[in-house]
Amino acid sequence: MTQEGRSGAFADWLSADAALCDAIADRRRRAGKAILVGIAGAQGSGKTTLVLRLAERLEHRGLRTAVLSLDDFYLPRAERLDLARRVHPLCVTRGVPGTHEVSLLNAVLDALLHGTAPATVPTFDKAADDRGEPRRLTPPFDLVLLEGWCIGAEPQPREALADPVNDLEREEDADGHWRRWVNGQLADDYAALFARIDLRIFLKAPDFAVVEGWRAEQEAKLVGSTMDRADLHRFVAHYQRITQAMLASPPADLVVELDAVRRPTLN
């Protein structure tokens, strides 16, 4: 990107950030209580960076803000290995619905939105593919920003699951058992979790084709990563079905459309 292009993108994000903060602050004012804001988007779309910027801006407006990542609630590797034995081998890979500890996330949300005692929040070490040292957050908060790639995703009709969307599903889930199980998770615990969200924001990639490149950029910055491009291609394939469904019909109140270099347009 040229210097002019970088400056333009920066200006675009300043405008988008301000509009998003206005919407969040207005929703908090009208609610009259602590609210939960969900920020979704494909891998590499910039969710974490956006959430940290929004939190800083909202704090400057006098709104005490807690930040959570759905990724930190991945099941420990040992539990995913158990799922792989009991349900399907593809369950060992973190990220898809069914590989998060939703009950723990709900308990943390209860503490942050309604409690007064400190909450213990897990963290996840992606290089080690396992949980790291937890952190503590102390209420009260005016709002909680929860970011995650599948926040708000909805289950697909059963007939939509019949045909595989990529080689991973075609070769490693030929009978569709894994994708039906994942879809069932979306219809159950995840639906109840997403129903708690007061305001949903979606970073909309231009198409799924850019996602692998965006995720490769993330991986290059991850200390200790051993994932090569073939591993990355297979990893991203786990997310393709749900990501494409979300791109086709964004499950959000506010949609930030991104171009291939993540320049935003707020809708």
Image (cartoon, grey):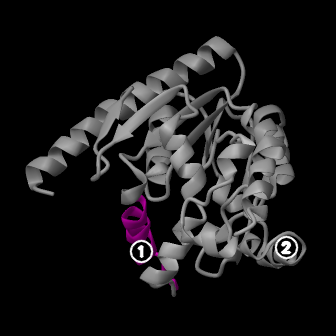
Give percent across and percent down for residue 134.
74, 65
Above or below for 16 versus 25: below
The residue sitting at 75% across, 31% down in the picture is 195
Above or below for 198 versus 6: above
Give percent across and percent down for residue 163.
62, 56
* Residue type at the position of mark 2: Glu
For mark 2, what is the residue? 79
* Residue type at the position of mark 1: Lys
Magenta stretch holds residue 214: yes
User: Who is closer to the viewer here, 132 or 46?
Assistant: 46
Give percent across and percent down for residue 5.
14, 48
- The residue segment tinted magenta is 211-225
Q: Main secondary structure of the magenta part?
A: helix
Circle 2 residues within 10 Å: few <14, some 14–19, many ≥20: some
What separation in Å lies between label 2 and label 1 (alpha carbons)?
27 Å
Residue 27 position by quadrant: top right
The residue sitting at 75% across, 70% down in the picture is 91
Residue at the farthest right position: 86
Residue 190 position by quadrant: top right
- Give the number of the disc on residue 90: none
The residue sitting at 43% across, 42% down in the picture is 204
Above or below for 50 versus 222: above
For mark 1, what is the residue? 221
Q: Give the foreground label among 2 and 1.
A: 2
Marked residue nearer the N-terminal end (2 or 1): 2
